[in-house]
Amino acid sequence: MAKAAATFAAAPSRTPAAPAAAKPRGGWLQGLVCGIALTFAPAYALALLVLLAPVVVAATLERGRPRRVARAMALCALPACFAPGFALWHEGGGVAHGFALAFAPRTLVLAWSAAAGGWLLTEILPLFLQLGLDATSLADSRALKAERARLLAEWDLGEGDEAG
């Protein structure tokens, strides 16, 4: 009996092992890149930080690793930052001009509304798509019910409850 208990205790477990927690990779690299950007191009870093503030907030508040909302917001807001970046480049890239350019109402509204468009794409658009799919399904269901009723009347099968 003791031998059977020892064999049972030494048998491998049939339950699957819990997956190992994924380590976040690249955190130190992101910090290094941000540090280099702040050191060598403070005007550009400031302008990007101000213009991409909604993206930074979304990335900070969004839980989970893929961060789909923040990525969509960044993809929509980054093109709005190209024109201010080019203007800053042509003006010499000074910190004072970077402040003025980053807080200009036109550029701020453009970049933040582009980020809001990215948020809308990921949060609101799926709701409208689901509404459209539901409406299509409802219309198809009604068409099928009308076709069934027509076939039942044509073949004189009555109500068709016993048929299914």
Image: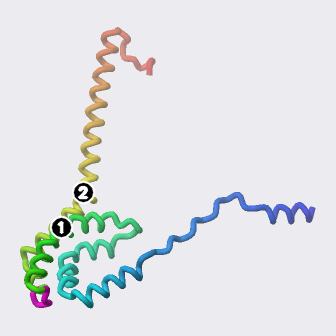
Q: Position of residue 56 (x, y in %)?
A: 27, 76
Q: Quadrant of the N terminus?
A: bottom right
Q: Earlier in the sequence, mark 1 or mark 2?
A: 1
Secondary structure under badge 2? loop
Q: What residue is at 17 percent from the left and 81 percent from the top?
A: 47
Circle 2 sits on which residue? Answer: 124
Q: Position of residue 7 (x, y in %)?
A: 85, 62
Q: Residues within 10 Å of mark 2 (few under 14, many from 20)?
A: few
Measure the C-alpha gap from mark 1 to mark 2: 21 Å
The quarter holding residue 78 reads bottom left
Depth check, front residue: 11 or 71: 71
Circle 1 sits on which residue? Answer: 79
The answer to if 95 sits in the magenta stretch is yes
Q: Is residue 94 above or below residue 138?
A: below
The residue type indicated by label 2 comes to Ile
Secondary structure under badge 1? helix
**Front disc: 1 or 2:** 1
Q: Where are the magenta residues, as a range?
A: 93-97
Q: What residue is at 24 percent from the left and 58 percent from the top?
A: 121
Q: Position of residue 160 (x, y in %)?
A: 39, 17
3 left or right, relative to 45: right
The answer to if 35 sits in the magenta stretch is no
